[in-house]
Amino acid sequence: MQRFILIFVASGLITFGASRSRADDDREPAEPIAQNEPALNEPALNEPAQNESAQLDAGPEAASHCVTILGDALQSLALEKWIAAIADCKSIVEQLDLQSVRAQLNDRSAKAVGVWRLASAERAKLVVKPNLPIAPELAALRDKIHKAVANYEQRPLNAAQQSPWEVMHRIVAYGIGTEIRRDGPTGDKVNAIGWLLWGNRAASEPLMVVSAGRPLCRVGPGLQGHPGQFLGMLAQSQVSILTPFQLDGHSFTVADLVEQEKADCSTHIELTFKLIALSYYLPSNETWIAKNGERWSISRLVQEEIQQPLRTGACGGTHRLFSLSNAYRYRAKQGLPIDGEFKRAEKYVRDYHRYTLGALQNPDGSFSTEWFTKPANADDPARKIQTTGHMMEWLAQSLPDSELRDPRAIKTIDFLATQLSQDPVKDWSVGPLGHALHALIIYDQRAFGEANPAIASSVAKANRPANMATRPLYPPVPRSGVDQW
């Protein structure tokens, strides 16, 4: 628990990055040099307290006071109040053996992370981005994006015919407001995330079950394709860590899923989607012990992902690049330096930005039909949607703001928007379609900064007041209406 407190107070990790020569735009970046996990040197709690007036003598009363003010801070959406509570407790933490209160603090820790996330989100709303002028041709592109996104949102999947894996890929595109129909094409609409999270069936299979008293997200055909995939999609949808759900009469929150993914970390399994999830839900300096006894951290997850050959990653390596981008972006949002493994990840991703845009784009704006292996331009529209949708999804998420209007990026977005809007009744494969739509939605939000009418309901739900975030995302039996959390 001390480590949990420390992450909000000061300092961080001592890490060492490996350098690589910059790749030419037309040459695939070299795989980075593998490194040993850097030592985790946590800062000592012996410097002067930041708030001298708040210091208390050590003892049971002080311990109780510490737990109380931290608990009070959990009810606040002000990040400043949480940091102040940590500072107030600092002198107590220095002097106390926390064994007597550790259970209480640990019980509150997951909630603290959730409140910190919500507070950060509230603060982010105060940042006003300047409205860049939109040229007529870009306005036309924006409208084409909106048309494509609106078309597929009006064609919901249904729980009788589509598997959990397919429903998850519609969630990839439309996020927390995604709706599906229960019981078939004419069934009532329900929230897709809530439907899966509460253990309901899609194509006769539940995604979530209880195992040994804990929530288990199943992996297999029609379910999760990769460990941590569902939690990664919840993270991309910005579902609160405090969100409650029930399975077989047991009550859980998303924090329980986070703990499960932390416990299952191992070098013998795929870690890509765990990194996507945990880099969102945890502070980037977080460390933990997995059930195999190994010490893990976000930094180690980054290291493990970097040293794997890109082409062995899911969907040509696009999800691996997405996870690495997420890791350093969320670290930056936490106000921490991009150093060590995070710096290596940033450089690696930037090299692949140059390689993808410089060597893998086809004349029509699509990307290579052979992923990152080599340039290729197969005459196969479905394959182009698959590779280009995934690759542009990662680019739309990770390109710096200054490069979003790069003509090459615009050309690819136009390719996707054209393909998905020119034949509104075409049934593309659900997985590739979800990633292609997600690429358009991310790009629209970042490049144009305007609310897309087609997904206004999703955005409105995601931006509800924070006290709404702990309400269930649809219990098993849907209620009337669509405006429910």
Image (cartoon, grey):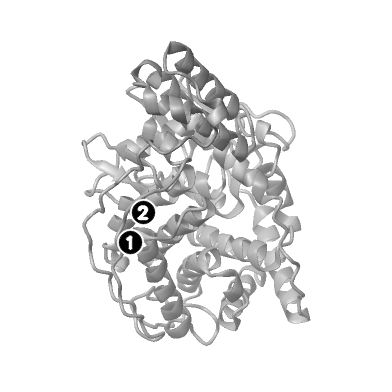
Q: Percent x, y for residue 217?
A: 40, 37
- Residue depicted at x 65% and y 69%: 423
Q: Percent x, y for residue 393?
A: 52, 65
Q: Percent x, y for residue 317?
A: 36, 65
Amino acid type, callout 1:
Gly
Residue position marked by numbered label 1 in the rendering: 313
Badge 2: residue crowd in 10 Å (few <14, some 14–19, many ≥20): many
Please tell me whether mark 1 sits on a helix, a strand or a loop: loop
Give the answer, above or below, for where 252 lies relative to 327: above
Residue position marked by numbered label 2 in the rendering: 272
Badge 1: residue crowd in 10 Å (few <14, some 14–19, many ≥20): some
Amino acid type, callout 2:
Thr
- Residue depicted at x 78% and y 80%: 136
Quarter of the figure with the C terminus: top right
Q: Nearer the viewer, mark 1 or mark 2?
A: 2
Q: Is residue 465 visible?
A: yes
Q: Is residue 425 visible?
A: no
Nearer to me, 19 or 150 = 19
Contact? badges 1 and 2 (CB < 8 Å) = yes
The mark found on residue 174 in the picture is none
Residue 321's image quarter? bottom left
Give the answer, above or below, for where 143 lies relative to 49: below
- Image side of residue 46 versus residue 437, left or right: left
Nearer to me, 266 or 174 = 266
